[in-house]
Amino acid sequence: MHLVSIQVAKPQTLVSQQKEIITAFHKLPIQSPIFLSSYNLSGDEQADLVHHGGLDKAICVYCQEHYAYWEQELARPLTFGAFGENFTIAGMLESQVYLGNVYQIGDALVQVSQPRQPCYKLAKRHNIDDLPLLVQQTGYTGYYFRVLKEGWIDVKHPIKLMEIHPLRVSVSFANHMMYGDKKDMDGVRAILAVNALSDSWRETLSKRLSD
């Protein structure tokens, strides 16, 4: 498990289909040490604070292993950060990572809080309208970290697994319950039992139980 690249960006105007969108999706790699706070990396911001960022979604993570698939699928070369991620990582696929797992990177401690839900800005970034749906269908969504301990990190730092969540609910399983088998209430309850689950996913899945 290791960091491959770290990306940050501030909001800027993106023109897509003759419409202007304010987004921080165009993230650029950094090579020097950077401070990770409870809300974000130093120099990184989110344009839409309703759906992005916050304590539960301080860091967006994407797997290096998925890039080869998308380069073939989209018939174009891609640079790290192409999926709007802060961390491009290796050795931590969605099927291998559990909600609530805790990792150390440099001085910081982070925890997996929820799968990443791709939004329309991913489509606008690559001019492919159904790209968010394709990402959901593949399960190559990535996921979010919350920050348990702030600190300095560097792309050269290893990622150390500090705590495996005892319920072992994988990001892949959570994706399947959210987008696939929506009638499996036992599966929903299994996800809700993870105390580290983000507030937004807890609200959505709790509503599914009550409907």
Image (spheres, rainbow, N blue to C red):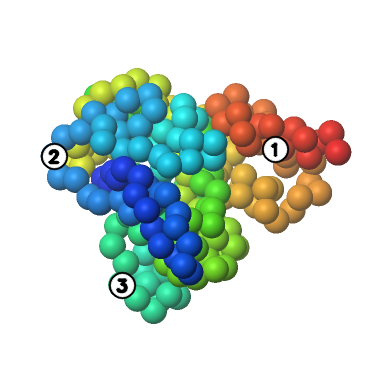
Toward the viewer: 83 or 104?
A: 83
Give the residue type at disc 1: Thr
Q: Which mark is residue 77?
A: 3
Q: Quadrant of the N terminus?
A: top left
Q: Amino acid at mark 3?
A: Pro
Among the two numbered marks 3 and 2 on one chain, the one whose residue lies closer to the N terminus: 2
**Is residue 154 shown left or right of residue 166?**
left
Q: Residue 34 is drawn in which quadrant? A: top left
Contact (CB < 8 A) between labels 3 and 1?
A: no
**Percent of width and height locating residue 98:** 51, 38
- How far is the residue under mark 3 from the one under mark 1? 35 Å
For the residues labelled 1 and 2, the Cα–Cα distance comes to: 38 Å
Q: Residue furthest right?
A: 211
The x, y position of residue 100, in whole percent, is: 51, 30
User: Amino acid type of disc 2?
Assistant: Ser
In the image, residue 104 sits, relative to residue 174, either above or below, namely above
Q: Nearer the viewer, residue 129 or 32?
A: 129
Near mark 1 (Cα within 10 A), the count class, few <14, some 14-19 or many ≥20, is: few
Labels 3 and 1: the sequence-earlier one: 3
SS for tag 1? Answer: helix
For label 1, the residue is 204
In the image, residue 6 sits, relative to residue 18, either above or below, namely above
Q: Secondary structure at mark 2?
A: loop
**N-terminal of the two: label 1 or label 2?**
2
Total marks shown come to: 3
Residue occupying image coordinates x 63% and y 36%:
201
Q: Is residue 89 visible?
A: no
Which residue lies under the disc numbered 2?
32
Q: Residue at x 30, y 50 (%)?
A: 27
Residue drawn 55% across the image and 27% down it? 196
